Every structure is written in structure tokens, then in C-alpha cells.
Amino acid sequence: MGIQGDKPENFEQENYMLIAIVYDSGWGHTARQAQSVAEGVRRVADAEARLIPVAEGAIPWDVLEASDAIVFGSPTYNGAPSARFKQFCEDSTKPVWSAMKWRDKVAAGFTNSGAQNGDKLHSLISMALFAAQHGMLWVGLDLMPGNDSSRGSVHDLNRLGSWLGAMAQSNGDQGPDDTPIKSDLDTAAYLGQRVAETVRRLQVV
């Protein structure tokens, strides 16, 4: 569901963090990833997560400007972010990029595809470059790769072995109630928590 453009009541509260999660989702699988990122953000005290699906109405640019961090998410289609997510990136030029309104905000990303690999890395690279062009500070995963030994399993965090952002894989014959699997969603939550903790450390400096 979308959000309104007004700032939250506790916006001026000391140590308050607003973390926006801007995402697209074709069939609901990436939306589950986005919800897990939000759950991870909320594990950190005084952190509010705001889900902003790009397909649902006008983008609240004022909320994004007020955010301490923005996490980008998109399914990977044909080795790249979705057309709707790329439209969001293009649309940011006039209201945001021209005045560098996101400079020094923390950024991160996540993506999902049907294939185990699916060239998801290219989508994360696209998001990281987009964030760099806005002067943002990119946060990746600090997890060792999971499922990479005889003792590992698909239930490990970071089972797809990504550091640039959180990856998930969803079977094409299953809906979002069944896939991505729990470890992928837990990895997304870990990323959300890491972003919030990074913002908190920057607030203290």
C-alpha cells in the first residue's frame, strides 16, 4: 500500500529515523522482500520504515527527501530492474537529482528473480550506480555466503552469496505466499536492520 506525503508526527524527535523502501513488484514476490526489509528496519529503536510501491500513485518526493535512508528494490527482468523501477529513477531527475537532495543519505538495494542466478547482480549494480549519481552512501551486506559447503543449506542467510545487496529467488510456478523462501526473506530483514543501524551510527558521529 502507498503512503501519504505528510511527514510523521515524531519527525523532530531526537534519534528518530525515517527509512523509505521504494520498490516495484510484478507478482508480489518482491513486495514480500520489501516487507521483510521493513521488518528489519523496525528492529532498531526509533526507526520507522515506510513502504513506497512505485506502481501505486504519485511518488511522495517530500517523504523521500525527509528520509534518512532509501532502500531500493525491484524484480530482475531480463537481467535488469523492471521498467517501472527504471521510470522512477528517470523521474527523480528534476525533483531530486538537479538539486542533489539525496546527497549523503544512506542507500541499499534488493532484488528477486525466478532463476537462481538470473543476472540479479546487474540489477543491484544499476541501483548502486543510481544511488552514486545522487551522492548517496551505499550499504551492502556483511554476511558470508551461505549454502557454499557440504554443511550448508538453502536455509542459510545469504544463500545466494551476494554482498552488494539482498538477493532472493522465487519459483515461477509458486505465488508470493510460498516463495521467496524464509532464508531469502530473513536476509532482506538483515539488510533492513543493517541500514537502520548504519544510520544510527552516522547520527552519533
Image (cartoon, helix red, strand yellow):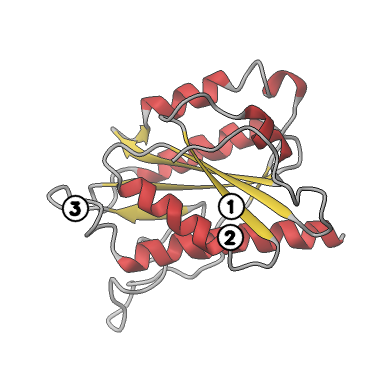
Give the mark nearer the N terminus: 2 vs 1: 2
Residue type, mark 1 in image: Ala
Q: Which mark is residue 41?
A: 2
> What percent of the width, then of the height, locates residue 143?
51, 68
* Label 2 to label 1: alpha-carbon separation: 6 Å
Secondary structure of residue under mark 2: helix
Residue 2 % position (x, y): 48, 37
- Left or right of residue 158: residue 195: right
Q: Going from the N terminus, do you reach mark 3 or mark 2 first?
A: 2
Query: Is label 3 in a helix, a strand or a loop?
Result: loop
> Furthest-left residue in view?
173
Residue drawn at the location 53% of the way across and 60% of the way down? 191
Residue 37: image location, x then y, percent: 49, 56
- Callout 1 touching callout 3 (CB < 8 Å): no
Residue 58 or residue 153, whichever sits in front: 58
Which quarter of the figure has residue 62?
A: top right
Q: Earlier in the sequence, mark 1 or mark 3?
A: 1
Q: Measure how far apart labels 1 and 3 are at the Cα level.
A: 27 Å
Q: Quadrant of the C terminus?
A: bottom right
Which amino acid is tagged 2? Val
Q: Residue shown at 68%/64% (left/top)?
A: 197
Q: Residue beneath label 3, please?
A: 171
Numbered tag placed on residue 49 in the rendering: 1
**Amino acid type at image mark 3:** Asn
Vertical side of 117 occupied by 159: above or below: below
The structure residue drawn at horizontal position 36% and vertical position 62%, both measured from the top left corner, is 184
The residue closer to the viewer here, 193 or 51, is 51
Q: Mark 3 and mark 2: span between their CA atoms?
A: 26 Å
Q: Mark 2 and mark 1 in contact? Answer it, CB < 8 Å.
A: yes
